[in-house]
Each structure stands twice: as C-alpha cells, then as structure tokens.
Image (cartoon, helix red, strand yellow):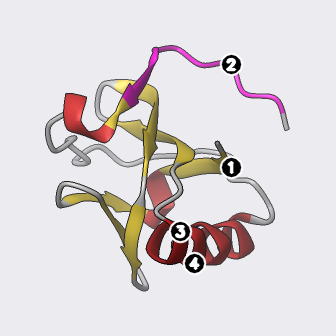
Amino acid sequence: MELALTTNINETEEISQPSFEKPVNIEQDQNLERKIAGALLIGNSYHTKVYITYKDDEGEKSITTTIWASGNKYLCLKGGIWIPLENIIDIELK
C-alpha cells in the first residue's frame, strides 16, 4: 500500500497531543492489528521505533516513535501521546 504523505515525518518529541475530534473515514492497512502487535513487541523489547501514519483534525501525518501500549481503542506512544486506532492508517518498521 503506497501512501501519499502530506507532512514530513516527525519524531514524537517534536509534536504535541494531536486533536481527534472530527470523524474520520480512512482506508486502514488490512494487516494493521498484526503490525500493531509487532510494533508493540519491538518497541518494548528492543526500543525500536516505527513509522506511524495517521489522520488527525489537521490532516494526514507521519511520525517516527516507539509504541508503549495498545488497547481496544488507542495506542500510547512515547511521550504520553494517545492516538485512536480508528485514526491509524499504517505502521511500518523503521
């Protein structure tokens, strides 16, 4: 799946908590759940960062970060940033 990125890839430390108030209608990678599980494992075990492409109220963005936790509705990233799973477009190994 090729993604047309509308912003630069930022480190987690360079962004503040994104806003997710607007409803989203995005096409997610079909293997997203598997990718989240893998990213969580490598983030906690090896401190390896991943590329996360998501959509917030300002548009599509990509960041390089470590996933610290995953729940039923959100990802918790390094720095305490929370992203709703429904807003995640794709996750790729760095």
Give the Cα separation between the discs numbered 3 and 2: 29 Å
Q: Residue lying furthest front in this view?
A: 46
Q: Residue lying furthest bottom in this view?
A: 72
Which residue occupies 46% across, 15% down? 8
The amino acid marked with disc number 4 is Leu
Q: Badge 3 is on which residue? A: 46
Dot 1, crowdedness within 10 Å: few (<14), some or many (≥20)? few
The amino acid marked with disc number 3 is Tyr
**Mark 1 touches mark 4? (CB < 8 Å):** no
The amino acid marked with disc number 1 is Leu
Q: Badge 4 is on which residue? A: 41
Asked if the stretch drawn in magenta spans residue 46, the answer is: no
The image quadrant where one finds the C terminus is: top right
Give the Cα separation between the discs numbered 1 and 2: 17 Å
Instruction: Indicate which disc residue 93 carries.
Output: 1
**Mark 3 touches mark 1? (CB < 8 Å):** no
The residue mark sitting in front, 1 or 2, is 1
Q: Badge 2 is on which residue? A: 4
Disc 3, SS: helix
Q: What is the span of residues highlighted in magenta in the rendered image?
A: 2-10
